Amino acid sequence: MEIICTENIYKIYNQGRNEVKALDGVSLSVMQGEFLAVMGQSGSGKSTLLNILGCLDVPTCGRYFLFGKSSDTFDEEELSGIRNHRIGFVFQNYNLIPSLSAVENVELPLLYRGVEYEQRRKIALEALERVGLSERSEHRPLKMSGGQQQRTAIARAIAADPDILLADEPTGNLDRTSGAEIMNLLTLLNKKGKTVIIITHDPAVAAYANRIVTISDGKIAADERSAYEAG
């Protein structure tokens, strides 16, 4: 089932004189359960695309369909619900709150949803267990390694049981070993049914995905099954 579809979308800054086309007519379809890597160099438009897919930004023109509905028909309440319930976000810089423990960080989206304390604590601890961090639940971010912080961020993203995980350079601040652990975790989550879309400039990271889309100068330059998958 198709859950994401962009039709000829553009994102244009400084329209008119000196305009910049961050996205230049991108059409993309993503099926439920796919593991998609979007590759490209810095400035290629890949993060702009991810922000639009995550309903954090809107295209200048073109149409974006999410779960079969045009995004321009969503009101603010619906957009907030989508971001809080149906899409989980993982960022390169983790975006954890330093003064909170791992379990408290994971609880935050559930707190915003109005989930009662006992239930959200139970869900958060289960999410940390899924990413192998049960023993670190009371540690604050500064007491954890980069890989552990990113796993905490993934636990936070999956605590609300979203349909889609969007990850922007999830291994960008990690060493190779920690990066491989994160990619193996995302692969496992995908095998358990999550649709996963990652942004990366690293071919080794992209190879974990089933499909690789390459963006250059705001356009899709290639769309192919990964060599890893093909093999």
Image (spheres, grey):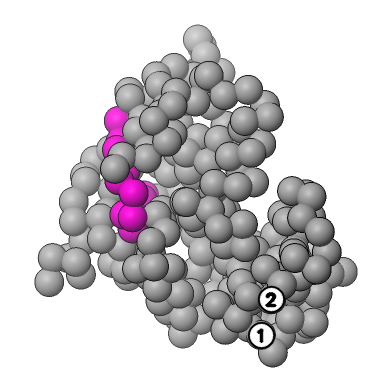
Q: Position of residue 124 (x, y in %)?
A: 69, 70
- The numbered disc on residue 125 is 2
Q: Amino acid at mark 2?
A: Leu
Q: Residues in magenta?
A: 23-40
The vertical placement of 158 against 136, above or below, is above
- For image coordinates 55% across by 78% down, the residue present is 131
The vertical placement of 36 against 153, above or below, is above
In the image: residue 191, left or right of residue 158: left
Rounded to the nearest whole Å, what is the CA distance between mark 1 and mark 2? Answer: 7 Å
Q: Position of residue 177 (x, y in %)?
A: 46, 85
- The numbered disc on residue 177 is none
The vertical placement of 171 against 82, above or below, is below
The vertical placement of 11 against 92, above or below, is above
Q: Quadrant of residue 34?
A: bottom left
- For image coordinates 57% across by 53% down, the residue present is 89
Q: Is residue 39 visible?
A: no
Residue occupied by mark 1: 134
Q: Secondary structure at mark 1?
A: helix
Of labels 1 and 2, earlier in sequence is 2
